[in-house]
Image (cartoon, coloured by chain):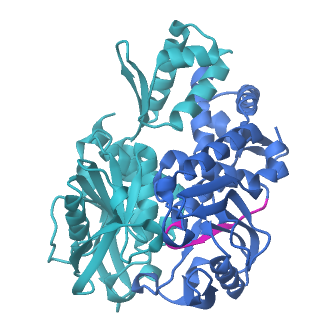
Chain colours: A blue, B cyan
Amino acid sequence: MKRSERLVDMTKYLMERPHNLISLPFFATRYGAAKSSISEDLTILKHTLADNQDGILETVAGAAGGVRYIPFWGKKNVTQYLQDLAKRIESSERILAGGFVYLSDILGNPQDLDKIGKIIATRYAYSNIDVVMTIETKGISLAQAVARYLNVPFITARKRSKVTEGATVSVNYISSSLDRVSKMELPTRALKENSNVLLVDDFMMAGGTLTGMRQLVKEFNSNIAGICVLCEADFDDEKVIEGHLSLIRIKDVNDKQKIIVAEPGTLLGHTNFNRF
Amino acid sequence: MKRSERLVDMTKYLMERPHNLISLPFFATRYGAAKSSISEDLTILKHTLADNQDGILETVAGAAGGVRYIPFWGKKNVTQYLQDLAKRIESSERILAGGFVYLSDILGNPQDLDKIGKIIATRYAYSNIDVVMTIETKGISLAQAVARYLNVPFITARKRSKVTEGATVSVNYISSSLDRVSKMELPTRALKENSNVLLVDDFMMAGGTLTGMRQLVKEFNSNIAGICVLCEADFDDEKVIEGHLSLIRIKDVNDKQKIIVAEPGTLLGHTNFNRF
């Protein structure tokens, strides 16, 4: 196989398996090529990704070594996308009762999910995440988008028991937006002990739901490695959670004047984005 | 930019935008290269994808022409994956009460979702799908995986009204597994009139839920372009729906003997998979 064909296949192969370590001998056998040729191919691939600030090809030396494709978006790309997203979120047609914002179109758009997933996966690329967790319903697409780029499973806490999930563990939490005690649960087989869990959700007001998820993770003797939301309502002062990051900060939702004010959130400050 | 670098970037660019028509002048400008060189690059890309039965690069001639990457998996790949998946589903630990089967691990695994999404997107690659639709909760990851490869939005019908979605249209349907009348709804702004809708769901017993979704699509004056489920329970004889396809057919779930019998479903028979 020629270099040109190898490069097409190799790019596709690596992109479909983010974070997986692929050995040089594997590629050498796949293409019937010398290891030195494969090394040269990988150098080309690495530099092309780096030039676009769109992906890292990591080389792991030694007998058990190989290469690993890390989805990674540079600060320039991320800033531009988040500013554009904030502007789209400011459309007054998105205003819903109770200070909520209509986001279902964004959470169902594969091009947006692709970018949002890549951004969050960049932030947690080196956090040894074992599993991404969210709560039904609207957090699911977000969790899936992130999980794809980290190449780890994702799990969904549910607000109601289903016979189709078997035995569950449940916790009670105070849902601040509804101002009442709610229940959420997770199948016992969904999460192994000592897992490193990344919590994601679509929208955060005071953070009551995230508190519930954190408690649920503790019940499984697992560890929270990070908390990240798509939108954070900054006008809700009574936050019950700390240490979370947001892609978008919503500073005001004024139903009467039909105004939403949104801007890039706290995630953008993280040093991972400066790596290029 | 050299050919080798162009090929890496081009492969990545096209893979991130399935079904989108990209013009030759766009690539010529992006790489500062002659159109004739770009044409040669695309020929290499096309043949490499075809050799693996893993994607079609379609050339559209004329002034408004260009190329389009169609995710497409050949019959050999699909058969092998579905046989393997059927075997995994036959694990007796998956048996739940009521003839249900635990599938949450598969529906939360990015590598499985990737393949399942690619298979369904291959079947409907030329069906002019405008939107993929499912119902909460477990169908969502399936819908997202398919929508990504068709590069169209996906929408989620809900069983309960939420303030965070605004005005909705609702229908009643008979849920056969629960044997009672249920309600599902969709935000009015989620679906445009005259859309071509692909319905997907994780598990089908008699098909009551799909009947509800079909009715909901009609309320939006839209058209069903296809119905596809991950698993179909073949032991439920009283089907209330026709014309659906399944990836996996579950022939028996025996709780006492702890046996599940599963095999590749009806989708595999479709001619699209023979294209290579």
- Quadrant where the C terminus of chain A lies? top right
In the picture shown, does residue A246 fall above or below B28? below
Q: Magenta span covers which residues? A: A127-138
Q: Is residue B84 shown to the viewer in this render? A: no
At a point 43% along the width and 43% down the height, the residue shown is B151
Residue A41 position, x and y percent, is: 70, 27
- Quadrant where the N terminus of chain A lies? top right
Closer to the camera in the image, B186 or A157: B186
Closer to the camera in the image, B74 or A187: A187
Residue B47 position, x and y percent, is: 46, 24
Q: Quadrant of residue B253?
A: bottom left
In the picture shown, does residue A103 fall above or below B160? above
Residue B159 position, x and y percent, is: 35, 76
Residue B28 position, x and y percent, is: 56, 14
At a point 49% along the width and 61% down the height, the residue shown is A102
Closer to the camera in the image, B176 or A207: A207
